[in-house]
Amino acid sequence: MSFWRAKLSFLLAVACALPSFSQGDSARRQAYLDELRQVLPPSATWEAWLETSGELPPDFAAMPSVSLLPDPLGDGADRITEQNQWPERRRELLAMFHQWILGSVPPRPDNLRVDVRGEEQRWGASVRDVELSFGPRHRAKLSFQLYLPEGKGPFPVFMTQDNHRAWAMVALRRGYACVVYAGADSKDDTETFIDAYPDYDWSKLVRRAWAAGRCIDYLETVPEVNLEQIVLTGHSRNGKTSLMASALDERIAAVISSSSGAGGVLPTRYYSEQHFGEGIENITRSFPDWFHPRWRFFVGREHKLPVDLHELVALSAPRSCLLSIAYNDGVESSWAMQQTFLSAKSVYAFLGVTEKLNLLWRPAGHETWPTVIERFVDWADAQFDRGDYTFPERLIHPWDWDAWLASASIAIDPNSLSDRGGEDVLSLANGSVADDRAAYVKRRAEVREAVHAMLGTPPPGGRAGAGTYGSEPAHIEQVLGRRDAGAGLRKEDVMFGEYINADVYMPDAWKPDNTEKHPAILWLHPASHSRGYVAAYRRGEQAFRTMARAGFAVFCYDQVGHGRRIEEVEGFYTRHPDWSLLGKMVRDAQEALDAMEAQSYIDAENITIVGYGLGAMVGLHLAAVDDRPARYALAGVPQPFKLDPPNSDTGGIRRWSKVDLLVPQLGMFEGMESRLPYDIPDLLAAMAPRPTYLVCPTLDREASAADLISAAQSANRAFTLFESDTEIEWISPVAYNHFDPKMQRLVIGWLKGS
């Protein structure tokens, strides 16, 4: 088949596999673009592409909303049921990746020209320098080195990119033929592909991925290598490239993706700016040529993506795949990685090769070291039956709701509760103020009791008091990104509760021996697994530093399962089947309040809870059980439960209960949300008469701003019962859900004026 006929065949196949989401109402699509331009920071490269291409966002209204991870095997009636259907499903997924994230690639060239530029012997191995040329008029060039051990072979093949050459030397020592190719930042020949193939809109990383296949084209002519035993490896952006290469070329028998993060193994639905991570906005602006510009259309609408990155991992099935991750790597999320692993594992299980997908944890941050690479080679040996190495499955974050249900004592049975339907959540008497106040007090007590029941039966707890023994050492602070207080600030270490480290940031002008009392903030961070209370990716300054510079003592700590406390959640429900992670988080917050009251420089009567995302969820439940905080400022507030059924755009209450097991008892009410004994408006009402502020962005895929404002209006009825002019205030900025400097300024402005 000629090159151009192959190209036409490929493009037709891609077009036929894609739904017509890019069609639809042009005025609506233009409105989407206008909105994105308003909420996104400038990106000159993206704007230039928009101008050149004339493209508009897809018609989001015509696209299904899938808040939780799409099933790689398909959804509903379209889910495949037979193993022989996987190749076609795989082609569908790959076509969607080409359309929305990667860009198109040419077919395999049939005119490969080989130029061996030299070969020499070194330390018992031969090193061959090769340059390939191919494509129209042989304008595409690719150089690499092939290392061959002494002996007849055939040898398994260890492939990697130019800047991982030292990795290849480890594999060479262990008997692998090694290919080190120029598809990395240190040396990148794939820029020549652009001129050679001008009709393809491929992105940089997928060009580098496609280049790996050209090396394999050459290896097919080398008798010393075993073409059935090719492993491709890569770290960080090269880890993304390696996954893409495995998706493109099934001759790759095994792939190792190390710390590939956003754009690699982590689904955008579970790893974005909402999670203090490198979301679509950041990565497409900072590295505009890594992915196709269309991906940027989905900022704030990640739930509309027809395909997500966990499915990139699934595309390697049934071939072997190792996912490597570090607990505190800022480009990663241990929880999102585990979700990817579990989803991809369902495909491997469907194909009967569960043992071929493995997950390898490591401590610390983004770095690798010789021990890690030795384990990579151990794993490759295990896949190729060259050694007896084991990689037992280890899942750190709670995930098995059915196992929890089998072991827990259920405190709240939905069937024993009445359907509250549209009943006013405050159950006010609508009579005299005195009657209404009495009704409110009664209802508030009921809510407090219901919250305690939902959070579960707490184990015994005491008060250890505040101190400094056990504070984080400097090297841990460095890994977690909080070694320095910041210009004009100082940091105090406080140990509190159950051996938890807290950092208190404050203006440097506040001397340690100054007994003057100052206002304080308890900072409750969002789901931010790698760095805890520190944002790994952000625009502007860290939120806690911004708040400290505004004149507050900001008390910060990692919530359980985050930062230094990731492994603390492993086995949590084995130890405490009748409690909950949210219950533990609320207890930690109460003990943090104890510690704050003990600090000489903090005004115990002037403590504000600032919570975002997960932190807002914790703050809401804290308000129901603890009267001490003076005010609340919450952003990214959860959707009201009874307005969050399973088929909702947000994903339903399943995400809080059955996906991350934050509060598993909530899962008992899935499909029966109107029977819940309390809801978000009840928790907001529990804040009365304390000043409360909500930031409800207009483009929030996890909550409706209109529903949250309605909840606040309902809760404000409780505020009118007190001899105070306080009420819940809210703002709904035109923005997607993230805690950027604009959001922070809104919160601080309210705090300074309240």
Image: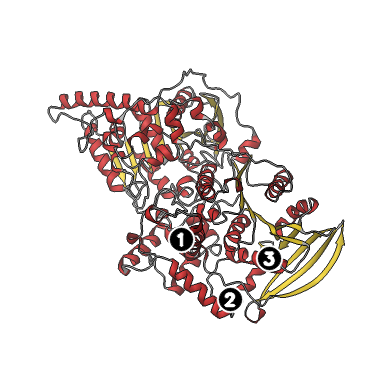
Colour style of the rendered protein structure? secondary structure
Q: Earlier in the sequence, mark 3 or mark 1?
A: 3
> Viewer-nearest of labels 3 and 2?
3
Q: Is residue 12 left or right of residue 26?
A: right
The x and y percentages for residue 217 are 68, 68
96 vs 687: above or below = below
Disc 1 and disc 2: Cα gap in Å? 24 Å
294 lies left or right of 378: left
The amino acid at mark 2 is: Tyr
Q: Is residue 359 visible?
A: yes
Q: Residue at x 49, y 34 (%)?
A: 559
- Residue kind at label 3, given as amino acid type: Ile
609 sits left or right of 310 in the view = left
Residue under circle 3?
Answer: 216
Asked if disc 3 and disc 2 are in contact, CB closer than 8 Å, the reply is no
Foreground mark, 1 or 2, reads 2
Tag on residue 296? 1
Kind of element beneath mark 3: helix
Position of residue 560 measured from the top left corner of the image (x, y, whole percent): 50, 33
- Residue 197, numbered circle: 2
Disc 2 crowd rating (10 Å Cα; few below 14, some 14-19, many 20+) is: some
CA gap, disc 3 to disc 2?
20 Å
